[in-house]
Image (spheres, rainbow, N blue to C red):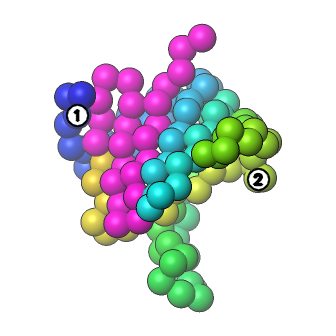
Amino acid sequence: MNERNLSIEEFNELLQQWSGNTIRITKHELRDQDTVYMNLDHIDYSKDTRRMDDYEPMHALHLHGTGRTETDAHNVQPLPSTYYEIPLEDSTQYQFGENHFSLVTERGTYTIQLIHY
């Protein structure tokens, strides 16, 4: 795959264009992989300066919409909330390739792919 690095501003600008479409979010974290299929409504960001510990992100990307989640065991469940949260770090790498984004953090890699039906 041929990916190019993006600034957070470029990433946000490109991802905002996907609102109204169906996306697949794949999270690879340690030995865990989850997949979410979502009808993306809109995107926003949060900043939490009152974190209880370092596991809670200071910054997060919120992908709002409806959808379902699939675990390694192929267990399918509706999303537990109206948004999917991706923790962001100062060191997060934002990449874009043909029809997907990759966000690489210290915890794992998140891939956001546009789904064409």
Provide the secondary structure element on which disc 2 rests: loop
> Residue at 64% of width from left, 33% of height from top?
37
Viewer-proximal residue among 60 and 9: 60
Determine the CA span between mark 1 and mark 2. Answer: 31 Å
Along the horizontal axis of the image, is 44 left or right of 10?
right
Along the horizontal axis of the image, is 21 left or right of 76?
left
Vertical position of residue 83 compared to residue 65: above or below:
below
Vertical position of residue 40 compared to residue 53: above or below:
above
Residue 32 position within the rendered picture, expressed as x and y whole percent measured from the top left? 52, 55
Image quarter for residue 68?
Answer: top right
> Residue at 30% of width from left, 48% of height from top?
94
Residue 75 position within the rendered picture, expressed as x and y whole percent measured from the top left? 74, 42
What number of labels is visible? 2
Queried whether the magenta region covers residue 106, the answer comes back as: yes
Q: Amino acid at mark 2?
A: Ser
Q: Is residue 68 visible?
A: yes
Q: Is residue 44 visible?
A: no
Residue that numbered label 1 is attached to: 3
Q: Which circle's residue, 1 or 2, is located before the other in the chain? A: 1
- Mark sitting on residue 88: none
Quadrant in which the C terminus appears: top right
Vertical position of residue 55 compared to residue 98: above or below:
below
Residue 49 position within the rendered picture, expressed as x and y whole percent measured from the top left? 52, 82
Along the horizontal axis of the image, is 108 left or right of 22?
left
Provide the secondary structure element on which disc 1 rests: strand
Q: Amino acid at mark 1?
A: Glu
Vertical position of residue 47 compared to residue 81: above or below:
below
Magenta stretch in the rendered image: 95-117
- The crowd level at tag 2 (other Cα within 10 Å; few <14, some 14-19, many 20+) is few
Residue that numbered label 2 is attached to: 81
